[in-house]
Image (tube, rainbow, N blue to C red):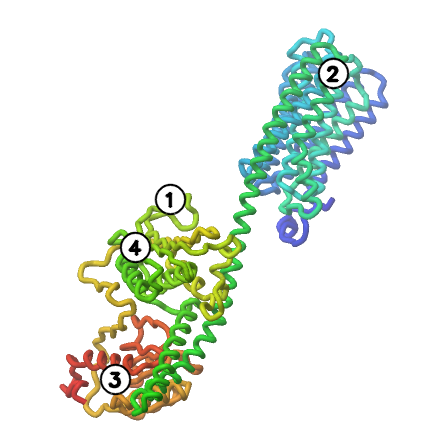
Amino acid sequence: MVVVGSGERDSARGRSGPPRTRVSRAEALTLSAGIALVTGAVVMTRVVSDPRFVRFWDNVHWTVGYGAATLAAWLGRRRATGLARESKTWFVLALLALFTGQVLWDVQVAANYNPFPGPSDALFGLVGPLSVAATWRLMRAADRARRAAILLDALGVALAVLALTLAAYLPRRADTDLLTLTVMVGYPTALLGATGLFLLSLLHLGQAPRLGASLLASALLAQGLLWMAWNLATLEGRLGDGVLLNYLFSYATLLFGFAVCVFTPSRDEVSGSLARGYRLVTQTLPIAFVIAAAIAVALSTSLLPAVKMAIGICMAGVVIVAIVRQSLLLEDRERLLVAEAQNRTYSERLTQTQRLESLGTLASGIAHDMNNLLTAVLGHAELLTTQPLNEEGQHSVENLRGAAIRARDVVRRILTFSRQDSTRTEPVDCGALIQEVADLLRAALPARHTTDVTLERELFVEINPGQLHQVLMNLGTNASHAIGDRSGRIHFQVRGVDVAASAGSVPPGPYVAIHVSDTGVGMSEATQARIFEPFFTTKPREQGTGLGLSVVFGIVSDCGGSIAVDSKPGHGTTMKILLPRALAPAAGAVDTTEAVNPAPKPAVRVEPTPAAAGLEEVMVVDDEAAVGGVLGRLLARKGETAVCVGSPDRAIALVREDPARFWLVVTDQSMPAMHGTELAEELRRVGYQGRLVLSSGTDFVLSGTPFDDLLPKPYTLAALSSLLDRLNRAGDDEVDETGARKLQQR
């Protein structure tokens, strides 16, 4: 036991490590004085010979012992907080009832008024129920199912104790009236039931064993057993003054008070073998109740009929409790199995997400480098198309250009998969776009593969139209591959649905359901579990890379939707997509179904004003010399004079020397020293008034940036021509501050 002063309480609480048994100095003095006075009174009962003085000193050690225990418990409650304080309040009330009942007993003895049951017995009878209330406060943090299990187990223990008490009391009842017998049975049953409830709460809540809890359980058990022995002695007529049983009451109550002082609910839950032991005890209690009931009934055959009937009734109650408790165990087991299945599902999803994220990071870096290499390859192929070549040379250049464009598309799919590709979203009419995709597939797929559509019009989702086109084309192509060389059917279906809260895969609300079905070979469950993994494919190497469905999964997930597969080997496959439904675009909005990848539109700008006469040069900023060089040569083919620089610092220096030299600056976004956006802002600060264009391999959102337009990588002459036309058209109606000629008139 560690004694702390009032000034040490806060520092003692703040120390790290496991909780230690502590009492304050006032509590220690109170308990020490109580033990000394009780011992002195006990000694006096052995010294004096007059029965009147023996009874007097008996009452003295009871009163002093109960009073000291109550005062110490009250002092301990003042130090407690939270649940411990609430629980100790009820334990203090239990001790106060015991002390007040003893004082009332002293008054009755002094007045020579000693009925049984009398006024003091009403207070003694409250000790058990108040202890039950104190234990119940400890279970407030437990969930409802656990509290129900604890109460059922405690009820089984109380019924078993009641049967034991009746078996002990009824044969010795003699002429004892029913009220007296009820009071005698109530004392030990309530106290031992409180003991069982306290221990069961510790077991069910998985609290680590602590000295305070052990002392409190021992004190409650001692009170119950002492009251059982006291009443049994009363029935047998062998109760007297100055006997050991009387002394034990005082010392047991002092133990009760000390236990209340040091008890604190444990914050540590058991683990390992101890946790398994706890679980085994709680799960076997129903079986133990049934076995105990069977033994009790078997042993009661030789007892009196009244005793046998009482035990039978109690044991029937125990069996009912065991049955109900076992049903709760089965429900808990079922909930546990469901929770474990959900945890496995979430764990698998988390693993898949982490795998996609790690591969996406790797793919993004590789795709960026590949994009720069393809920019040089495709750019030079474009330059070759402007040269006079023979037929074989032109054929080779076209093949080279086509291969570079296909490689560019692969890189863009990888960037989409990596989720570092910023995309512009807008309301898209799913029905119209699906009809367009179906028309494209009919032209591209074998004639033996029929494609049909069932759709509802005016169903919109908020998505990038190019991405939705990619999703549908991917699923349609996969369906065709699944059909193979046989004749088969690919069916697209789109309809509006309302998802209920119980669905679970997506939040409740209105959705657009897109189903893509085929009559192909189907998939096994093992294949279905892996189809969204990157680089997983069942196709031959020359037909697939394993990225298609990973990209589909990423696009659908980013839109807040879900995708599922329904397939059986030999029965075809249905891919089921749910996308949140969006409002239809306002009247006059652009129809996204007219072009899957519409050309980027320049931002409407008031500042800066167009450049004045003499602005003839274009500056290309790219840290990759091959990329910047090929763009410079492509610009030369379009009649522009290009100046290529390899660093943002050099670009800033040139503009600072002559802000009016360049009418257009094209800059890369990802550069070591400075990003393209930062370069554009710096150019504006040093006085550049011309056009700014970002060269990027991704769909960069221009809103809120200094850029006027976007030139996607890799470059083609067609894309460059379109860019220059847009910039010139944007400048047709703009005039500088001095009324200089328009950009179109350079």
Q: Residue 300, which numbered label?
A: 2
Residue drawn at 67 percent across, 32 percent down: 285
Q: Amino acid at mark 4?
A: Val
User: In front: 313, or 553?
Assistant: 553
Mark 2 Cα shell of 10 Å, populated few (<14), some (14-19), many (≥20): some
Q: Earlier in the sequence, mark 1 or mark 4?
A: 4
Q: Position of residue 603 (x, y in %)?
A: 25, 73
Mark 3 Cα shell of 10 Å, populated few (<14), some (14-19), many (≥20): many
The vertical placement of 302 against 689, above or below, is: above
Residue drawn at 62 percent across, 50 percent down: 10
Q: Which numbered disc, 2 or 1, marks the residue closer to the eye?
A: 1
- Badge 1 element: loop
Q: Amino acid at mark 3?
A: Gly
Q: Earlier in the sequence, mark 4 or mark 3?
A: 4
Q: Position of residue 195 (x, y in %)?
A: 67, 30
Q: Amino acid at mark 2?
A: Ser
Q: Which numbered disc, 1 or 3, marks the residue closer to the eye?
A: 1
Q: Earlier in the sequence, mark 1 or mark 3?
A: 1
Q: Which residue is mark 3?
A: 690
Q: Residue 453, which numbered label?
A: 4
User: In front: 622, or 366?
Assistant: 366
